[in-house]
Image: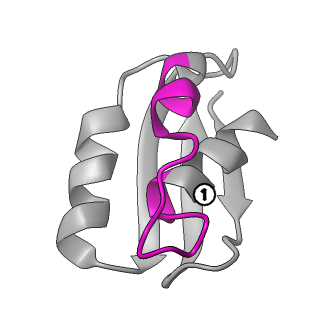
Amino acid sequence: MSIHKTFYPQGVCSRVIDITLSDDGATIEKVQFTGGCHGNTQGVCRLVEGRPVSEVAALLKGIDCRGKGTSCPDQLARALEE
């Protein structure tokens, strides 16, 4: 059975990130952002699905959006690290 996680990002335009992981928690099956820049978040979702959690977290961690100190991809990385 898949693992579902809901994350409430801080400091970005998106309001919710819903994440579905494989039953062992190692692979991202699906990601959906609520709010944020639709085209960008949709692109991030397609790029990360099917990839290992650790790989995606390492790639996205620290990405900054307009000097906010975080971004939607960074918030996804933080959610995956929890």
User: Can you give x and y, in whole percent of width and height, for residue 34 in the image?
Assistant: 46, 78
From the image, tell me which residue sits under label 1: 75
In this rendered view, identify the residue nearer to me: 30 or 48: 48
Residue drawn at x 68%, y 22% as measured from the top left: 25
Residue type, label 1: Gln
- Left or right of 40? Residue 29 is right
Colouring method of the image: one colour
Q: Which quadrant of the rendered structure holds the N terminus?
A: top right
Q: Which residues are magenta?
A: 55-73
Q: Is residue 10 visible?
A: yes
In this rendered view, identify the residue nearer to me: 1 or 75: 75
User: Can you give x and y, in whole percent of width and height, for residue 79 in the image?
Assistant: 69, 49
Quick check: is 71 in the magenta stretch? Answer: yes
Q: Is residue 72 above or below residue 56?
A: below
Query: Which element carries disc 1, helix, strand or loop?
Result: helix
How many neighbours does mark 1 have within 10 angstroms: few (below 14), some (14-19), or many (20 or more)? many
User: Can you give x and y, in whole percent of width and height, for residue 58 in the image?
Assistant: 55, 26
